[in-house]
Image: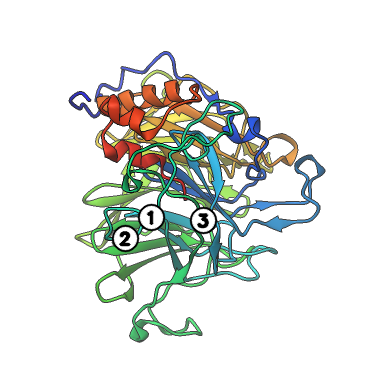
């Protein structure tokens, strides 16, 4: 594959072909189960898959949901094959609404969240799940596998297994059941009562992210009718001790369902809100890791309209380097209970510049979730659309301002071709020179 280029820095260079594309999953054609429409779920992604955890759907005959339901389940969507797979696992967290999720080295981390009714039972535990599709520390799979259309691409309607002569160590693994484990924190920072210790409060709608050797937790709602908090906690992954940080500077108001962007020096808080209120985006709060200090950054409006994005919570955000993209969300005004948004914006972390992208989402939406893929797409799943319907649709859109690596664009084209082909094996990918780090993305849990 060819040499790499990462991004375009010219804010005026917006692609005219930015459009949201509805993904018709291969599951639909093959009549295989798909995730039920939901809101309040969380997603993360790595180089191969989108991971969908939890979510909520009220009783709704349109979705076939017979009672208010929190989904205690984990799904993955493979970017290459465009197939959904439900990941079977034991001891899955049961506070699955408005929790937060992240991934590091094929290990999922889920924190916080609430069950239903909201705010009655909440969590402040981090649980992890290893989703590596072959034994850790091993260069081979522990049994012979078939490179098949079931575990790879396969044409529409294809169900015949075609075994390759490729050695077992080079074929995708099949589904296995694994187990969620709580992270054991140092007893000196832990108290079952959550009083007088360093541990975060039980809450939902927080933000969780990694920085160096630590996990940070910010914000969240500690009850449905309670004011949200702006607490900032850090878990040292070496000592496993929690620390409640006491920063200097202009501390942000308490909020939940905000979104976070991060660079080497700071993390940035976008939007968020409380009951019937959402924070604006003309100013962004930034926390300096080295100084333990909050500051308020005044942003620059769109150069054409002179406008900022509307205030919002429960929206989608993805980040690629200094490029941040937000979409949709819930906006409140004095005259409206709330407004669902359908706009799409870019924010440059270096210039602090907003640019409105001249494309609308397929529907006004909030409580959706978004991730970015290595091939330069934003994927958007679920959320609340018109008449309170929880959608199960998955969309993707090519992100402007970015030029993905040429190797990723080549892989994307190969995937497009082979998704339409019924007879191909791992050997076929090897024969055309596809590196193993890409073939390995076809691994099925």
Q: Residue at x 42, y 56 (%)?
A: 131
Query: Residue 357: image x %, image y %?
Result: 44, 23
Circle 2 sits on which residue? 136
Q: Residue at x 32, y 48 (%)?
A: 169
**SS assignment at label 3:** loop
Q: Are marks 1 and 2 in contact (CB under 8 Å)?
A: yes
Query: Residue 436: image x %, image y %?
Result: 28, 39
Q: Are marks 1 and 3 in contact (CB under 8 Å)?
A: no
Residue 302 seen from this side: no
The foreground one among 355 and 364 is 364
Circle 1 sits on which residue? 132
Instruction: Say whether disc 3 or disc 2 marks the residue closer to the N-terminus.
Output: 2
Residue 9 seen from this side: yes
Above or below residue 432? Residue 84 is below
> Which tag is nearer the camera, tag 3 or tag 2?
2
The foreground one among 265 and 192 is 192
Above or below residue 1? Residue 135 is below
Q: Quadrant of residue 95?
A: bottom right
């Amino acid at each position: 594959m060819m040499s790499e280029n990462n991004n375009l820095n010219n804010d005026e260079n917006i692609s005219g072909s930015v459009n949201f594309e509805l993904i018709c999953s291969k599951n639909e054609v093959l009549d295989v189960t798909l995730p039920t429409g939901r809101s309040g779920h969380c997603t993360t992604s790595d180089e191969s898959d989108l991971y969908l955890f939890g979510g909520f759907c009220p009783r709704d005959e349109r979705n076939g949901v017979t009672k208010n339901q929190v989904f205690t389940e984990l799904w993955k969507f493979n970017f290459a094959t465009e197939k959904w797979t439900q990941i079977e696992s034991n001891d899955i967290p049961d506070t699955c609404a408005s929790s937060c999720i992240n991934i590091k080295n094929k290990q999922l981390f889920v924190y916080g969240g609430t069950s239903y009714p909201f705010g009655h039972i909440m969590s402040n535990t981090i649980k992890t799940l290893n989703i590596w599709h072959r034994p850790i520390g091993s260069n081979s799979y522990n049994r012979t596998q078939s490179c098949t259309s079931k575990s790879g691409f396969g044409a529409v309607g294809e169900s015949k297994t075609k075994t390759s002569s490729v050695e077992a160590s080079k074929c995708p693994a099949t589904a296995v059941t694994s187990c969620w484990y709580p992270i054991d924190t140092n007893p000196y920072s832990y108290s079952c009562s959550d009083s007088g210790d360093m541990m975060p409060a039980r809450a939902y709608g927080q933000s969780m992210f990694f920085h160096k050797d630590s996990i940070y937790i910010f914000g969240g709602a500690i009850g449905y009718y309670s004011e949200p908090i702006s607490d900032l906690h850090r878990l040292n992954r070496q000592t496993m001790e929690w620390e409640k940080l006491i920063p200097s500077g202009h501390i942000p108001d308490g909020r939940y369902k905000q979104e976070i962007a991060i660079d080497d020096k700071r993390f940035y808080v976008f939007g968020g809100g409380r009951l019937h209120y959402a924070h604006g985006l003309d100013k962004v709060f930034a926390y300096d890791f080295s100084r333990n200090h909050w500051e308020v950054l005044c942003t620059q409006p769109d150069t054409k309209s002179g406008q900022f994005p509307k205030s919002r919570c429960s929206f989608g955000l993805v980040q690629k380097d200094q490029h941040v993209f937000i979409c949709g969300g819930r906006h409140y005004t004095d005259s409206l209970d709330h407004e669902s948004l359908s706009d799409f914006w870019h924010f440059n972390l270096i210039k602090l510049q907003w640019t409105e992208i001249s494309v609308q989402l397929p529907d006004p939406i909030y409580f959706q979730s978004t991730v970015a893929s290595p091939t330069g797409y934003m994927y958007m799943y679920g959320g609340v659309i018109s008449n309170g319907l929880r959608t199960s649709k998955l969309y993707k859109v090519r992100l402007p301002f970015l030029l993905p690596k040429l190797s990723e664009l080549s892989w994307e084209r190969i995937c497009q071709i082979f998704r339409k082909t019924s007879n191909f094996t791992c050997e076929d990918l090897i024969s055309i020179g596809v590196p193993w780090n890409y073939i390995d993305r076809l691994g099925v849990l």
